[in-house]
Image: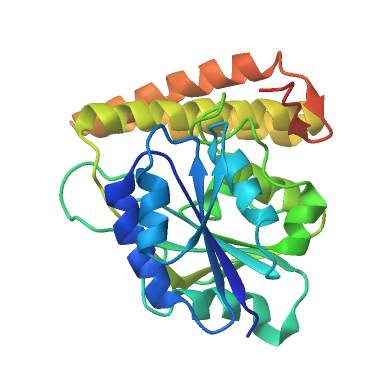
Amino acid sequence: MPPVAVVVCSRDRAALLRDALASVVAALRPGDEAIVVDSASKGVGTLAAAADAGLRAVRCDRPGLARARNVGVRATSAAVLAFTDDDCRVEPGWLDAVAQAFDAGDDRAIGFAFGRVLPVQDDGPRLSVRDAGERRRFGAPGPADPVDVGHGANMAFRRAALADIGGFDELLGAGAVFRAAEDHDAVWRALRRGWDGVYDPAIVVRHEQHRATSQWLRVRHGYGIGSGAFAAKAARIDPEAGRRLLRERLWWRGARAALVEARHGHVMPAAANAVQVAGVVRGALAARRRPLAGDRFATGGR
């Protein structure tokens, strides 16, 4: 099976990062790579955690998850890249499952793979959890919404596919102007270029549910901002597909979902959907004014 380069990006969350790196190191196989990208941390904890784990680290002086991931891509050489977050712990055999997703029949059309994201804790508000148990394959034109493919906390790309789409859009993702959706945007662009992808439940990470309710709501609002910006950009590139994505985010996954939760007396899920749809509106309106460079936002020095 092909070797894999693991990229873990982090910004000032050294305590969480240490647990994540311990699980990554335990999953590495002969020939694999692993790198930590310090995404403009204010302290030295990120670099120290990488050193203590025996891993190479590179510094990215400007914040942004997509930007940091692109730095990690350039700093590695394996043909397959696996990404997880600093608040996740990969399961034993994670890299075997990632490699297998790209090696099945030596299928060069597979450009990306996603897997399950399970919560570490069973109580409290959940974030970025995906537990679908059925393997799926995606091809052009892809699913109605790339949200249905998976989550960037457990994501892998063939290097050639990332090169084909020009990498992650650096105005999307945590720490950037638009705070999320760099993963779904990359999937959407890869599918448009003819790459297929898979969701494989054998690829498993566990996500630490460490946020208090107020933080959880802020993150959900940020998810909406990124999601709305991505959909608005998609509408400028492919009006029909983009308008469909906007309707999905504003109504079916937004206002309607909030109303359904409220009718059932689920106060917090209703509030989370409401703040997320508010973020969608905010992100979509802001993205309309952003110039594009091809199918990515023009960075304009930011």
The number of numbered discs placed on residues in the rendered structure image is 0
Which of the image's four quarters has the C terminus?
Answer: top right
Q: Residue at x 66, y 81 (%)?
A: 103
Question: Is residue 130 in view?
Answer: no
Q: Is residue 162 left or right of residue 96?
A: right
Which of the image's four quarters has the N terminus?
Answer: bottom right
Q: Nearer the viewer, residue 47 or 215?
A: 47
Residue 86 locus on image (x, y percent): 39, 51
Q: Residue at x 65, y 75 (%)?
A: 102
Q: Residue at x 46, y 35 (%)?
A: 253
Question: Is residue 215 in view?
Answer: yes
Q: Residue at x 67, y 47 (%)?
A: 186
As displayed, is residue 34 above or below residue 216?
below
Residue 96 locus on image (x, y percent): 51, 81
Residue 61 locus on image (x, y percent): 57, 34
As displayed, is residue 239 above or below residue 55?
above
Q: Is residue 8 left or right of residue 16?
A: right
| The residue positioned farthest toward the left in the image shown | 123
**What scheme was used to colour the molecule?**
rainbow
Q: Quadrant of residue 263?
A: top left
Q: Quadrant of residue 210?
A: top left
As displayed, is residue 10 above or below residue 153?
above
Residue 106 locus on image (x, y percent): 74, 83
Q: Nearer the viewer, residue 34 or 157?
A: 34
As displayed, is residue 82 above or below residue 187?
below
